[in-house]
Amino acid sequence: MRLTVIGSGPAAPELDTPASGNLVSSDGTAVLLDCGYGVVGRLRSTIDPRALDGVVIGHLHADHFLDLAALRYMHPWNGGGDRRPAVWLPPGGRSRLVGLAEMMSERPSFFEEAFDLAEYESDGPFEIGDLKITPSPMQHYVPAWAMTVADRSGARLVYGGDTGPTDRLLAAARRADLLIVEATLRSVGEDEVTRGHCTLDEAIAIASAAEVDRTLITHYPSVRRADVQAAALAAGTRFSVAVPGTQIDVVPASDRPATADAMVPGQGTGGVALGHREAALAV
Ligand SMILES: [Zn+2]
Ligand SMILES: [Zn+2]
């Protein structure tokens, strides 16, 4: 499967990136992990949002779900008929969407009419197309879940969403082929006593302890991008920093070269070592 970063920004809007959104594509399935503001418009430069098979929302903060409203206004979907994208929400999410529809002066059934809405349960796996997705509870200011996405080849991607440093993320990410982890904070002092976000050092420490193959840092203010990239580079070639357009092919350990960084096919002669690759930043 392939990851494409759509948005890497935190809650405060940025000039050069939408809020949280990560597209995961396999041969037959396209799923968006989180749908924060600005994501659907930016997604159009990668795929037609009406072709999404599903959207999975990790928690109900605006920078992770509010563009479901934008997506809804793209209805009707490609192909017409009864095909509707699956939208998987946290527990209690359906009634929250009814409230959002009413706030928008739309019918209470506004979202239900266009999406196949469902609520997941903690640690309860579900499938969208050929992808299996497992939500794991994290540590945030509101209930929040990380998503583990597995494809039929055995490749495993873990998207932590918003979370403070927690053993639960460490457990979910253990030996993942790709971990997408947030680094919202400049320092621990910016956070509340009960932690809800990570610093960059904490993100790197969790990824290292979990022995993941590749780590992508996300959910950081753009003004800190140069510092975050320098720190990721210093942490080693297995770390890189998300910007809109970053693409990583996620392959299981059994399919990776034994001695070198994984390569991205089709990205120039012989591929490009991911650790040294900087995707173009679309503004
Ligand atoms: Zn957030
Ligand atoms: Zn949040």
Image: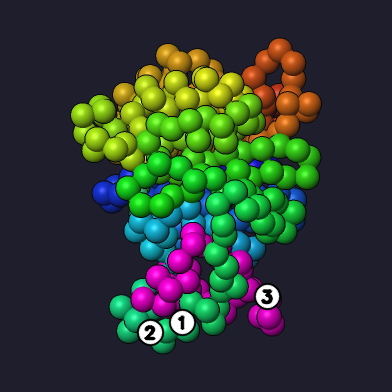
State left or right for residue 36 relative to residue 25.
left
Locate the N terminus and report the quarter of the image it occupies: top right
* Residue in the picture at 54% in, 82% down: 113
Can residue 166 be seen?
A: yes
The percent position of residue 274, horizontal first and vertical second, equals 58, 26
To which residue does mark 1 refer? 110
Task: Estimate the spatial distance between the alpha carbons at disc 2 and disc 1, rounded to whole Å.
Answer: 6 Å
* Element assignment for label 2: loop
Q: Which residue is mark 2?
A: 106
Q: Residue at x 32, y 48 (%)?
A: 141
Q: CA distance from mark 3 to mark 2?
A: 22 Å
Direction left: furthest residue: 189
- SS for callout 1: loop
Q: Which residues are magenta?
A: 70-99
Q: Residue at x 34, y 81 (%)?
A: 102
Q: Are marks 3 and 2 in contact (CB under 8 Å)?
A: no
Q: Is mark 3 within 8 Å of ligand 1?
A: no
Badge 3 amino acid:
Arg
Q: Local crowd at mark 3 within 10 Å, few (<14), some, or many (≥20)?
A: some
The residue positioned 62% from the left and 53% from the top of the image is 124
**Crowding at mark 1 (Cα within 10 Å: few <14, some 14-19, many 20+):** some
Q: CB of mark 2 within 8 Å of CB of mark 1?
A: yes
Q: Which residue is mark 3?
A: 83
